[in-house]
Amino acid sequence: MKSLLNFLLRIHFLLLFILIEIFSISLLVNNNYYQRSRMVNFTRELSGRYHQKLAGLKEYFSLLEINQQLVEENNRLLNIIESTYRSEELFFRNVNDTVYNQRYFYTPARVVNNSVNKKHNFITLNKGKEQGIRPEMAVVSDGTIVGVVKGVSENFATVISLLNFDFKISAKVKKNGYFGSLSWDGKDYHTAILNEIPLHADVQVGDSIITSGFSSIYPEGILIGYIDKFEEKGGSFYTIYVRLSTDFKQLNYVNIIGNLTQTEKLEIEQQAIKNND
Amino acid sequence: MIKTVPRYLVNFILLVLLQVFVLNNIQFSGYINPYIYVVFILTLPFETPKWLLLVIAFLLGITIDLFSNTLGMHSSATVFIAFLRPSVLKIIAPRDGYESETYPQLKYYGGTWFLKYSAILVFAHHLFLFYIEVFRFSDFFATLLRVILSSSFSIILILIGQYFYRKDTKRF
């Protein structure tokens, strides 16, 4: 013990130097945006690789469920393809020129890391810059909302989950189109809160809530969930509790939505704001 | 020793003010940002305990950081040169060592000695500071150019500052 103390006393200068230096650099990384983002990018690439290995292993355990999902999906798709219907109008068919007017494109991705128990939940996906993923793209799972891409590295992307304090999205009641902003209150991963719906709007328990399409991130009409309950809380707005239709604990495969006209829309909106000034 | 404390305190405040209000706003052609507040670490008495050196350096750095909104950047660089200072002093010591009642300043040990001394430490400080500012090695040579230009400029300013002290030998 005594020799240890002596040793510590002898190298106290070096020790103190290292301590203060670590403290300074942690201050630097935590308080300066640029240095932090460099650090986060580095660790994201590292942890992404690790989580991908882990997710690959975990996948085996949910194979049964995924198979079932695929069978159901196949079934549903088989039911709606043209060949199962008898066509009445043989000569005048509407043909959608899908490429010319395409506004959104979908990229499938796999969830390699996910959490639901924090206040700021993030999801890591195994697609990144090289697969054409950029920040601000929307993420959906089976037609229901998941989140927005926050940052990308070469092969991975971090998604702000809907279960995140910083996440806000414009949503509307499907049947009458009243819109408000939806966010999560950090309590239950099944429930989010929709605000700013005026009291004169007709809402009922069980009504569908969908995305409004105002934000240029999400296409219009993606299902968010159903009204669980609602209450009037001061002022002229409802506070609506929405039961999310996405099961965040079971996310496996998601689709990333890129908006081909996003920059165009933002540009013209910017212009309008500028002209207004 | 006790008498020198208020003088160093005034020095500290003056250097921080000069750095924050004047020199932080100077930027020639994107390459030269002089940081001369390190002269405070350079001119601390020889007999300052080593641990105190680190603590003072951290306080000085964090003060500059608070004013220039770069928390941790200057403090890590300043602590780094405070760590180097004892070894540098040992390496460039004159043949008969340092006399008591003197300070590591130009008027006691001459221009050549002080130039060597300040050049090593200021360069180390700027090297550390600029690399931690860009936080990557990809623009290695552009950053190195900034380090060399800025540290030469800082050293010149520091030397000029030392000549101001030269006249009033009576004060010590």
Image (cartoon, coloured by chain):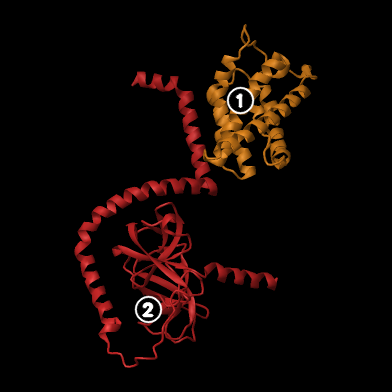
Residue positioned most to the left = A64
> Colour in which chain B is shown?
orange
Against B118, residue A277 (above or below) is below
Q: Quadrant of residue A253?
A: bottom left
Question: What label sits on residue A229 in the rendered view?
Answer: 2
Using residue A146 as the reference point, say whether residue A201 is left or right of it: right
Q: Are marks 2 and 1 on the same chain?
A: no
Residue A155 placement (x, y as % from top left): 40, 53
Q: Is residue A196 visible?
A: no
Residue pointed to by mark 1: B121
Q: Secondary structure at mark 2?
A: strand
Q: Residue at x 55, y 36 (%)?
A: B140
Q: Residue at x 59, y 43 (%)?
A: B70
How far apart marks 2 and 1 lie (CA) works out to: 67 Å
Q: In the figure, the red chain has which letter?
A: A
Using residue B122 as the reference point, say whether residue A163 is left or right of it: left
Mark 2 — on which chain does it sit? A
Residue positioned most to the top = B96
Residue A276 placement (x, y as % from top left): 69, 73
Q: Residue at x 41, y 46 (%)?
A: A43
Mark 1 — on which chain does it sit? B
Q: Is residue A179 visible?
A: yes
Against A17, residue B100 (above or below) is above
